[in-house]
């Protein structure tokens, strides 16, 4: 179906919009192929310019007396907008159009394929974080190499064409290991810590009910351990889930076959459990009139804070193994597409100061989440307001949001250690659910290549890394700290990420103002410093001139 | 009993101290009349220098095998220190000494009477906030006057010698009103808002079971209302408590006798309810190993956040009446010594930008809490760790802490609107429970005069207002805002005051560092600005000289 067929009422006057922090706006509603627009054509009045892709759920409240009714538009970014439409036919047309347009799944129909930036791209985000250059230093050593075994995405459809494996393991062994791992996700290098210990990730081994083994997989893993050294396998599933996976062909590493590895179970809830938790949390946040009791018990009941704690706990354990024990770690759960990436990426935030810079953080998301194969379009097909009746499935999950929230918690605890502010995290959250950029389209690199995203869409990184844009995400308190940072996971040290969860509920103006003031101080200081330098040079020049002319003595 | 009799073991070697954020310290314990000192005499090692007055409760854990034992010292400022003592006799002696020394009630035996500052007092805090000067502008008008009716503290023992009353009400009427109010606390001026509406406070009227009236009291109150204007009486008790007060001679204003006033009930819990709540909260905060669930349900169960919400809610209502309705307000509960002062002082923080400066905030505490007669030595005789077995009574209450926490909540919501940082609030909290300064000694001005505090002790304000000390409490983001600020009381906008409640639990170094960086930026900006100015002047001088000597042309 073409866009035109879906848009039955492209334009309608006298629609009243109610939204957070502004008075109702009486304006003209326009529906385009990708946007819902409401404009009063008056200056200084709030306008709406919403991607259909951002719409999670529409609630229709027909006005049975006068006709027409109210559309409650619940967005993936948690915002709720209300449109009052007085005409009966248009009310239905518009509701139907928005529903259809917001549920288009075909990626090439989506806005990134139509969006053309108005600025010149300084650095192409599509080529900014290639593994060859990201792992450049490592590849110059004699321990690690690139394998091109997956160059046509046949060995592992969810891996990128290039992955890093031990140099002394050849492709035959890797091929065998891939056959033994769920979805072909054989153990690959995620991060090498400064002490030499490494972080690997994979999917579950396909031991099945008969406890099959794969000597190649064992050899691949053992090759990363030094002689006499032991490693850790962190399983992000509960032992019950891991055990029951066997009946479906999956399983976990048997101790007898991996004697050099100690398996530790650190369960993190996933998929629908996380999405339910998020729904409950956002629902509680939106209920501004509730009592303190009810608010606190709903936050508790949502379990979101517990998910944060569990996740950070697991990431800290991984970081401890790598840093304090100098032991290598393999992380996996079932498919290795969710909790696994969550843990490996958070461990790097803790361990690697580079990941706390803007560029390093972008590279981390690119490596672990995008090239790592987290299926964003599937996981983010719906957000917190969806229900099973309107399209919520078990494949949807806010795992990436949980990651961003964990980063925000660490940021809170180490306010000077991140080059970027919470605003960058919010931008990433928004773009991962609905965007004009192609970065989060496609479920894996294979699909991204097939869709020709690099050619046909703009990368989010190209936008974010423009100096004037970047400026708005910088943390004025940043002081590079070349050290591991150890977040506390005590429950009282974790707090609600208010900048994200409360931004449509509690006015954030005063906090933004404070942040602006700090940034302003920093900017002003920089200006003054260069001004003082300039004046000092002028003074020196003038003095030199005076000395030369004999007006003042050289001693002056 | 003299100090010497209480100190049975003045000095003991090899005592091991365990405390927050440092390794155990092996040192010499000294007990003086006012301090518990532990020193290892090694540089860089934590020392203890604790006022006995700061000790809330001591727990003895004898070591039945080896003799001696462990003393767990729980401080009023929430800190917990553990001392391991190996000798049996000394263990008992020291425990007994500390118990006796920390429960001395006689004010003249306390440290402020012995403390002599090592610095010259620039401005005497004892005379810095006299009502004559504080209300100077108001008293020049023709509506308000000072009454000296209480100059010998006979009319109202808990009022200061000077209070402000309507000019057209003479002392006879006031005397009659005082007889009608609990403890003689007749309605007095607390604050006059810019629009002309006024905030009064008093205690409950003594209507008793027979609903007595007092025409003088009615006349006094009505005199502050403009013709045809109505005022509000905000009662900080529940209607049940107000009703039952009648049987004890108290009561509330009958509508028929105060037709120009609308009475609104806005209950705030008090005394032991608040202290129990604080105990539960601090206990939860100290349990760093608890699960997220348990932590959240204990915060909820403590009810502290609800007390914050109720209090802010009531203060906002008062502020709304004064600012938006332009109506005058009388606030009282029973005695008018606790919740009443809480509400009148918070309303001023909201309404009056002056109260958000350091000086204005000190003046507010002086006016409302100290001169207002809040009996600090009684309320703060114990803090959260006390039990009924060791001295907790119903007269103890953390009402002032609740006030400081409410201010901290407003600070959080308006980070640029306060001249001072949360550190000033913490200083005030600490000094109000145990101090080397005399400010919080005495239950009311009468007692302070009697104790000759102004002559015999140093004022906390004298210390705080020293420029180098003041500097450490300033908010680098402060931008004076000459406006009313409206805090939100939605439950999600109130958060745990972590800088206070978690400071002995979660390491605050990183947050202090961030704050220092912002202050540093501000300082550096100031320095650079004056440096640039200096250089510019030098350059101008040199150029002028050059022009005079004809070296360069004037146009250069």
Image (cartoon, coloured by chain):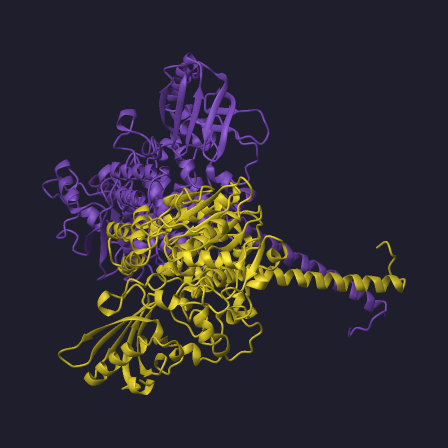
Chain colours: A yellow, B purple
Q: Quadrant of the N terminus of chain A?
A: bottom left
For the image shown, how many numbered marks are present on the structure?
0
Q: Nearer the viewer, residue B89 or B222?
A: B89
Q: How far from the left and from the top, in percent, is residue A161?
A: 50, 66
Specify the farthest residue to the right: A550
Q: Quadrant of the C terminus of chain A?
A: bottom right
Vertical placement of residue A158 versus A3, above or below: above
Specify the farthest residue to the left: B210
Q: Nearer the viewer, residue A231 or B309?
A: A231
Specify the farthest residue to the top: B89
Vertical placement of residue B505 versus A411, above or below: above
- Taking the spot 50% from the left edge, 24% from the top edge, the residue there is B38
The image quarter containing residue A265 is top left
Q: How far from the left and from the top, in percent, is residue A131?
A: 55, 63
Q: Is residue B404 visible?
A: no
Q: How far from the left and from the top, in percent, is residue B39?
A: 53, 25
Side of A37 relative to B509 (left or right): left
Q: Nearer the viewer, residue B158 or B239?
A: B239
Q: Is residue B164 visible?
A: yes
The image quarter containing residue A499 is bottom left
Vertical placement of residue B144 versus A474, above or below: above
The image quarter containing residue B325 is bottom left
Side of A548 relative to A510 (left or right): right
Q: How far from the left and from the top, in percent, is residue A149?
A: 51, 64
């Amino acid at each position: 179906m073409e866009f035109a067929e879906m848009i039955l009422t492209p334009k309608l006057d006298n629609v009243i919009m109610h939204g957070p922090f502004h008075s109702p706006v009486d304006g003209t509603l326009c529906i385009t192929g990708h946007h819902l627009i409401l404009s009063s054509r008056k200056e200084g009045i709030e306008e709406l310019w919403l991607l259909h892709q951002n719409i999670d759920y529409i609630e229709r409240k027909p006005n049975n007396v006068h006709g027409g009714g109210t559309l409650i538009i619940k967005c993936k970014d948690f915002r709720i907008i209300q449109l009052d439409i007085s005409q009966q036919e248009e009310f239905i047309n518009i509701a139907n159009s928005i529903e259809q347009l917001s549920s288009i799944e075909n990626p090439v129909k989506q806005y990134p394929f139509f969006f053309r930036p108005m600025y010149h791209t300084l650095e192409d985000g599509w080529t900014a974080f290639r593994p060859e250059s990201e792992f450049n230093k490592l590849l110059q050593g004699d321990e690690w190499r690139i394998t091109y075994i997956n160059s046509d995405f046949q060995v592992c459809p969810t891996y990128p064409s290039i992955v890093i494996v031990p140099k002394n393991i050849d492709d035959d062994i890797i091929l065998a290991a891939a056959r033994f791992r769920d979805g072909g996700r054989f153990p690959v290098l995620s991060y090498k810590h400064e002490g030499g210990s490494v972080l690997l990730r994979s999917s579950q081994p396909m031991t099945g009910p008969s406890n099959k083994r794969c000597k190649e997989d064992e050899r691949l893993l053992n090759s990363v351990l030094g002689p006499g050294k032991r490693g850790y396998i962190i399983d992000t599933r509960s032992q019950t889930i891991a055990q029951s996976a066997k009946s479906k062909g999956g399983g976990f590493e048997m101790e007898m076959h991996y004697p050099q590895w100690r398996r530790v179970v650190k369960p993190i809830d996933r998929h629908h459990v996380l999405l339910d938790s998020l729904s409950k949390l956002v629902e509680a946040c939106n209920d501004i009139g509730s009592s303190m009791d009810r608010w606190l018990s709903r936050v508790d009941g949502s379990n979101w804070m517990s998910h944060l704690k569990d996740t950070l706990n697991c990431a800290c354990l991984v970081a401890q193994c790598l840093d304090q024990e100098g032991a290598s770690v393999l992380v996996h759960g079932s498919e290795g597409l969710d909790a696994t990436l969550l843990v490996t990426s958070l461990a790097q935030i803790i361990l690697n100061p580079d990941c706390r810079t803007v560029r390093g953080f972008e590279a981390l998301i690119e490596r672990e989440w995008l090239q790592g194969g987290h299926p964003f379009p599937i996981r983010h097909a719906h957000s917190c307001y969806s229900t099973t009746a309107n399209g919520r499935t078990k494949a949807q999950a806010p795992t990436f949001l949980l990651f961003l929230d964990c980063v925000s918690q660490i940021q809170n605890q180490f306010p000077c250690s991140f080059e970027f502010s919470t605003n960058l995290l919010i931008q990433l959250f928004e773009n991962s659910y609905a965007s004009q950029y192609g970065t989060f389209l496609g479920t894996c690199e294979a699909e991204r290549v097939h869709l020709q995203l690099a050619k046909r869409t703009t990368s989010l990184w190209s936008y974010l890394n423009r100096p004037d844009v970047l400026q708005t995400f910088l943390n004025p308190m940043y002081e590079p700290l070349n050290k591991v940072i150890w977040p506390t996971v005590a429950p009282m040290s974790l707090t609600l990420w208010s900048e994200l969860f409360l931004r449509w509920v509690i006015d954030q103006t005063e906090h933004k103002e404070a942040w602006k003031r700090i940034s302003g101080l920093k900017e002003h200081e920089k200006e003054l410093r260069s001004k003082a330098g300039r004046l000092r040079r002028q003074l020196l020049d003038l003095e030199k001139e005076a000395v030369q002319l004999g007006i003042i003595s050289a001693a002056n």
